[in-house]
Each structure stands twice: as structure tokens, then as C-alpha cells.
Image (cartoon, rainbow, N blue to C red):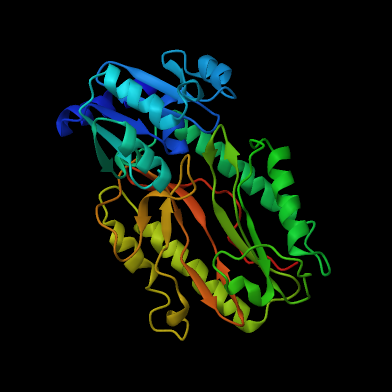
Amino acid sequence: MAELVIERIRAYLGEEQLGGFLVSRPENVSYVSGYTGADSFLLITADQKYFITDPRYTEQAAGECPDFTIVEWRARGSLAAAVAALAEKENIRCLAFEETHLTVRTYQQLREQVKAELAGVTDVIEQMRAKKTPREIEYLRAACDIASRAYERIQRDIRVGITEKELAANLSKYMVLEGADTQPYGNILISGPRTSLLHGIPSQRAIEYGDLVLMDYGCQYHGYLSDMSRTLVVGRATPRQRQVYDLERQMVEDVERYIRKGASIRGAYEASLRAIRDTEYFPYHYTGIGHGVGMAVHELPFVSPRSEGVFETDTVLTVEPGIYIPGWGGVRIEDQVLVTEDGMENLITATKDLIEL
């Protein structure tokens, strides 16, 4: 895959009349090179590919990226000095860089030291990453399976008196025990009225009888991520909890029935409104109902009323409309789906039935 990606980057350089591309976003560095570490950069030209890192990672980079020329930037004094030297060596007159990732300080240093013109670009490699290869789909499927199995395990721990923080820690542990990489990202596990917080942080709040418990979480498998949400009730659900839950499930299922190759991405948002539009809960829905997932938990495509384009096969994305009522709570069900030739495949195997513990 790496060589194909390099070819596509070089084709882009030719089309845009660029002499080189400085890659700095960690997920893009990994995607292009196969590297699994941190704090590294790539410089791609028409006929050269440089891996720029510091002494902590040179051995790892040499083993994981044997086709790249390894450059240790600390020996040059700074990253900017190393890039400047390479740009001069390769006679680069215009250097592309990822403008949404570099810090202001790094950009200023590059501007001071690199003699080439600097050209900020956005989403070049991200667009390449949107369509997944069979191997990437295999890894994403495995990550989703791990998260689904962890959902079964965490239900045994949920009880009155246990805290959100303890449950969140257990959930991360279960995913590692089920086969995830040991690099979990921030999982959301919140309860009671706090479930109206779209990205609430687990707290010391103890679970109470009658609480909604919302879990939005996932894991990493060979660098690829799962992202799922489920909401359950501790005790018997009240009529209102059941009503909101049933509406939420209908919203998710309406979107999943809509998704297919060639369908408008914006249309998926419209599909999510069918069940809720004429109800009292319409003001409490959130317009961002999905996003791509791959090496990053949020990547192209994004699904909202402002989305453009159509669904393409081999795209993996979440379906997660939600209902969030301040002071009462919220319900989110989130699946991770693969767009196929004739519809979509749900990679999350966990039930969407309302569970009462």
C-alpha cells in the first residue's frame, strides 16, 4: 500500500507543480510510511523519500521504513534546519506542508530557514485515506469486534455505587485483554443527567439506580480504530427513557437503511430526522451524525447538513445521531459501518436492544 500512496502523492506534486511535500500529521506519517512511532516527519519529492526523526526513533524507523532515507534532525540543530538542507539538496522551489497541523512556531522557523516557497495544503492525504483497502477493513473489523466483546464484559461491572472513572478504566482494560493495541484513546463513560454531555469526561460520580449509562468508546488494532456508543439503564427504564431510546434507535436504523454507494452524504442527515422531526425532542438532536474512522477516530467523510459529495464503497464511517436533553440526560447509539456496493455492513456486532441491568 505504501508504494501506491507514494505514487499518488508524487502525482499530486506533479499536478500542482510542487517540488516536495512535508508530511507532519502523525496518522499521515504512518499511512504513507508504515511507521508506528511518534514525533516524526516525511519529505516526499519526485524521486526521493526522507524520514525525519530524532535519536529516540531512528532504529525503529530504519526497521519499519527501510525504503526511506533516515534523517536525524537534531544533528542539524532543528527540524527546520534539516528540512532546509534537504530542500536545498533537492532543489525544491515550492514545498507543500500540512497547514492544519504545524504549530505557528514550526511554521515560522521553516519560513525563516527554508529558501523554497511554502504552500499550505489541506486534506490531501486525508482524502486518500477515506477509501479503505481490504487490509485496512480487516483491521477495522477486528477493532470493532474487540469493542463489541468489551461491551458484553463491562455490563457485568455496572452497578449502583461504582464510579464512572472505575467503569471507564475497566472498559479500556477489557479491550486490551480482548486483543486491542495497548494505546487506548479517551473513552467516554458517563451516567445520569451527565449523559446529555456529548463528549463528557468520566468523573467520580457514582452510578445510581435508574441512571442512563452512556458509553462512547473504541480501541486501536494495528493502528486502526473502532468507535461505538451504547446507552443502557441501571434498573427498569422509565416510560420517557424508553420513548427516547426507541426514537434514537429508529433514527440510527433510518440512516443505515439510507446509506448506499452513490447516495448523497447530506441525505443521510435528512434520513436521521424522519423519526424525530415532529416530536418534542427535535430541538435536542445534534447535526453531526457521523464521521469517517480509520487511523484517526474522526476523519473524512463527515456527515451533517453541510456535507457534500456521495458515499463511496470501502468507506468506513460512524452512524450516531443522538438526543441530548440538558438536565435530564441523553441517548446515543453509534454503529461503525462499511459502505458496500448495495448498501452497508455494520461492523459493530453489539446489540442495539435496550438493556436494563
Q: Is residue 332 above or below residue 336?
A: below
Q: Is residue 311 above or below residue 133?
A: below
Query: Considering the image in quadrants, where does the N terminus appear?
Result: top left
Marker count (numbered): 0
Q: Residue furthest bottom?
A: 280
- Whole-percent x, y for residue 228 in the image: 56, 53
- Whole-percent x, y for residue 254 in the image: 41, 64
Can residue 34 be seen here? The reply is no
- Whether residue 13 sits left or right of residue 155 in the image: it is left
Residue under the image location 46 percent in, 35 percent down: 137
Residue under the image location 39 percent in, 36 percent down: 132
Can residue 192 be seen here? The reply is yes
Q: Is residue 47 above or below residue 155?
A: above
- Whole-percent x, y for residue 23 in the image: 37, 33
Q: Residue furthest right?
A: 161
- Whole-percent x, y for residue 52 in the image: 44, 24
Q: Is residue 283 above or below residue 339?
A: below
**Could you say which is closer to the camera, residue 24 or residue 240?**
24
**Could you say which is closer to the camera, residue 102 or residue 127?**
102
Q: Quadrant of residue 239?
A: bottom right
Residue under the image location 55 percent in, 29 percent down: 37
Query: Considering the image in quadrants, where does the C terminus appear?
Result: bottom right
